[in-house]
Amino acid sequence: MPKISVEVPRELLEDLDSHVGEDGKFVNRSEAIRASVRKTLDLLDEIDDRQGRHDGPQ
């Protein structure tokens, strides 16, 4: 799996970390970020579909 590097504002990272770990929804930061990216892309696809801009699976 390819790796990427991103800069994240501290307050966003703190919010992310509140959802990670034994008491959180995600096992680690990577899982949380992947889930967020998937969700965002799905939402953008839905918007494109509603606007008639989606050309199908990419």
Image (cartoon, grey):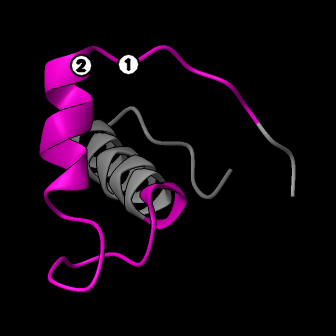
Q: Nearer the viewer, residue 52 or 45?
A: 45
For the residue labelled by badge 2, is the local secondary structure a helix, a strand or a loop? helix
Q: Determine the residue positioned at 37% across, 19% down.
A: 8
Q: Which residues are magenta?
A: 4-31
In the image, residue 25 lies at what x, y percent? Answer: 22, 79
Name above or below for residue 3 compared with residue 57: above
Q: Is 22 within the magenta? A: yes
Q: Which residue position is annotated with label 1?
A: 8
Q: Determine the residue positioned at 48% across, 66% down.
A: 31
Q: Which of the 4 quarters of the picture holds residue 54?
A: top left
Q: Nearer the viewer, residue 53 or 31?
A: 31
Q: Residues within 10 Å of mark 2 (few under 14, many from 20)?
A: few
Left or right: 7 with respect to 9?
right
| Amino acid marked by disc 2 | Arg
Mark in the foreground, 1 or 2 = 2
Q: Are marks 1 and 2 in contact (CB under 8 Å)?
A: yes
